[in-house]
Image (spheres, rainbow, N blue to C red):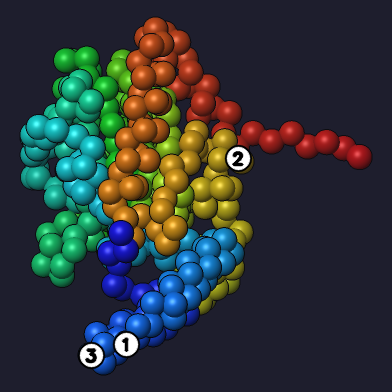
């Protein structure tokens, strides 16, 4: 069921048709006219236009979809996929970072530890959650929960959705780079299955701090990158307006990431994006997550850890063939 109301620039032709449909339906009700054929024609045209537009999306347009304000966030997926979620707070060192949420839950009746990066819907909530940009205490909280999961032999499910770790003075004073580095090291050796999924934005080390996993999944219109397109454009071309060009060059979309071996599987979204039908998206997510978690859970601890090590070691290795 179509739920989105916010319209991106490339979606405006679809909005024009929807407005025409709404006006025709209103006119039909007010004047008691039978315009069923005209309504059907517009509905068919809407579907055709959506298919055409979304079949030709550029990497920059997919980035815009990943940032859509109505896109499901971590807590939305936690509510849809898990039962009995018990949120745990604090890193036991400084404070509770609301940009990262986590706790125990049941997935298909089995206990897991779920950790996610959470943005806000309103200005007030975004300020509280720092626009989904974790501070070092967020990563330390995540690691505390992972260590708890290891102690009780619970699989870890991570949901990634951040523009990047918070680059503020306070975060630097509390050693955000060190916190991320420690998470990467510890996740590499965590003795329980880890499944990470990029559900929206996967920005730089901010994403990687909870993304070292046995399986890395990504939603169809999400992106995963070493830097944001705007940041890349500012560095390479000294102008953030070159972000579309940077998005193309960075190979950050799901189709490119699967080709490069950065992610293991792409989760399909409904036509128009996850925000148009969160229930269908959650069903697709559940199916893939169940399959991947089952496969990893069957491995011995040694095979799991060796496979995780090899997975990340082979990234970025290319063979150059001399002609």
Q: Where is residue 45 in the image (x, y as percent from the top left)?
A: 50, 73
Q: In which quarter of the image is the C terminus?
A: top right
Q: Residue 30 carries which label?
A: 3
Q: Residue 33 carries which label?
A: 1
Mark closest to the chain's N terminus, 2 or 1: 1
Q: How many labels does the image show?
A: 3
Comparing labels 2 and 3, the label whose residue is closer to the camera: 3
Which secondary structure lies at badge 3? helix
Q: Residue at x 8, y 45 (%)?
A: 95
Q: In this view, does 178 lie to the left or right of 58?
A: left
Q: Residue at x 17, y 27 (%)?
A: 106
Q: Position of residue 128 (x, y in %)?
A: 12, 59
Q: Mark 2 points at which residue?
A: 260
Give the answer, above or below, for where 185 lies relative to 32: above
Which secondary structure lies at badge 2? helix
Q: Quadrant of the N terminus?
A: bottom left
Q: Residue 52 carries which label?
A: none
Q: Where is residue 252 in the image (x, y as percent from the top left)?
A: 52, 52
Q: How much space separates mark 2 and mark 3, taking CA atoms? A: 56 Å
Give the answer, above or below, for where 112 lies relative to 252: above
């Amino acid at each position: 069921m179509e739920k989105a109301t916010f319209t991106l620039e490339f979606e405006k032709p679809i909005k024009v048709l929807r407005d025409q449909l709404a006006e025709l339906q209103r006119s039909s009700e007010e004047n008691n006219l039978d315009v069923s054929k005209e309504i059907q024609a517009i509905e068919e045209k809407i579907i055709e236009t959506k298919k055409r537009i979304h079949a030709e999306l550029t990497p920059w347009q997919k980035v815009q979809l990943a940032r859509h304000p109505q896109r499901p966030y971590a807590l939305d997926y936690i509510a849809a996929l898990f039962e009995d979620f018990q949120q745990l707070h604090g890193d036991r060192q400084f404070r509770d970072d609301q940009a990262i949420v986590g706790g125990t839950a049941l997935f298909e009746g089995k206990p897991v530890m779920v950790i996610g990066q959470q943005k806000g819907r309103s200005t007030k909530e975004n300020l509280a959650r720092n626009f989904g940009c974790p501070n070092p205490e967020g990563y330390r909280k995540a690691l505390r929960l992972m260590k708890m999961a290891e102690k009780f032999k619970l699989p870890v499910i991570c949901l990634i959705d951040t523009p990047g770790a918070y680059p503020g003075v306070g975060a630097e004073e509390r050693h955000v780079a060190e916190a991320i580095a420690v998470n990467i090291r510890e996740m590499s050796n965590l003795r329980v299955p880890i499944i990470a999924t990029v559900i929206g934005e996967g920005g730089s080390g901010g994403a990687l701090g909870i993304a070292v996993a046995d399986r890395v999944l990504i939603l169809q219109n999400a992106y995963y990158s070493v830097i944001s397109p705007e940041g890349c454009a500012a560095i390479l071309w000294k102008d953030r307006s070159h972000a579309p060009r940077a998005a193309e060059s960075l190979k950050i979309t799901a189709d490119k990431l699967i080709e490069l071996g950065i992610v293991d599987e792409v989760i399909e979204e409904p036509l128009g994006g996850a925000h148009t039908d969160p229930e269908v998206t959650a069903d697709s997510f559940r199916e893939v997550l169940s399959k991947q978690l089952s496969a990893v859970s069957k491995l011995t601890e040694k095979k799991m850890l060796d496979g995780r090590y090899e997975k990340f070691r082979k990234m970025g290795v290319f063979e150059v063939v001399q002609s």
